[in-house]
Amino acid sequence: MAAETIIRTPEQQWTALDPPAPGWDAPMPYDKRWWMGFLFAWSGLLLAITFSWFFVGKQNVPTLKREVTPASIQQEVEAFLAKYETEPGSGIARVPPGVDAYLVGEMWNWSSGLILKAGQEYTIWYSSLDVMHNPIIADQRYTFTAIPGYAYGIRITPTTPGEYLVYCSEYCGLGHQDMATKIVVEP
């Protein structure tokens, strides 16, 4: 017994078990084939750009990470400031090239301001002592997420002398709007 072809009108219900309608295997018209080819090529190009950007782009993805306790990172910051602070109690540190710098947040201030030399590489370690903070170096498109219990390090080489505001963009309480410091880049 041969299978019977069922042809239904649009008002009738179709199921996935019904045989396909006549003509379903007809070749796609040229204009639609061209358009589909273009869309596949465009999708492939965008996919390639997306994945290659990780390797050739200049993202500020932290490559250094370590677990810390609030007490241990606080001790590191205090030792750093004791050694490099410009004036006792100022919270501004003149960082020699090659020395790790620290930018640690707590409600509602940063551990230090930094004075860096243009053209020199620095590693800036950032963390938080209490809640999540998000330090942003204004005008430089650098943004980080500081999470309690972790210290993240970024390597930067400042090239343009100037004074750059660092502020917190993660709401951290009533004094959040005053949470700012600066990084000064000297020639």
Image (cartoon, helix red, strand yellow):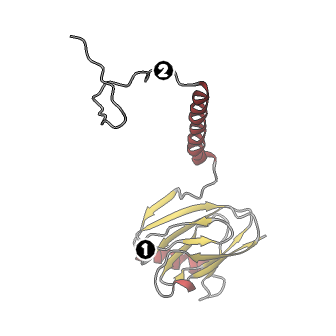
**Residue 32 shown left or right of residue 18 in the figure:** right
Q: Is residue 121 left or right of residue 10?
A: right
Q: Secondary structure at mark 2?
A: loop
Distance between the alpha carbons at the discs numbered 1 and 2? 71 Å
Identify the amino acid type marked 2: Ala
**How many other residues sit within 10 Å of disc 1, few (<14), some (14-19) or many (≥20)?**
few
Q: Quadrant of the N terminus?
A: top left
> Which one is in front in this view, the residue at disc 1 or the one at disc 2?
2
- Kindly indicate the quadrant of the structure image that contains residue 99: bottom right
Q: Who comes first in sequence, dot 1 or dot 2?
A: 2
Q: Amino acid at mark 1?
A: Ser
Mark 1 and 2 residues: CB-CB less than 8 Å, in contact? Answer: no
Q: Which residue is mark 2?
A: 26
Residue in the picture at 47% in, 80% down: 172
In-front residue for pair 179/47: 47
| Residue 69, horizontal then vertical, whole percent | 39, 72
Residue to which mark 1 is pinned: 72
Percent across and percent down for residue 107 are 47, 83
| Crowd band around label 2 with a 10 angstrom C-alpha radius: few (<14), some (14–19), many (20+) | few
**Viewer-proximal residue among 152 and 4:** 4
Residue 110: mark in rendering: none
Residue lying at 61% horizontally and 60% vertically, measured from the top left: 155
Residue 169: x percent and y percent? 54, 74
Q: Nearer the viewer, residue 80 or 169?
A: 169
The C terminus sits in image quarter: bottom right
**Helix, strand, or loop for circle 1?**
helix
Quarter of the image for residue 153 reads bottom right
- Left of 167 or right of it: where is 170? left
Q: Look at the picture and state if 150 lies above or below 16.
A: below
Q: Position of residue 185 (x, y in %)?
A: 72, 72
Q: Which residue is at the far top? A: 1
Q: Quadrant of residue 111?
A: bottom right
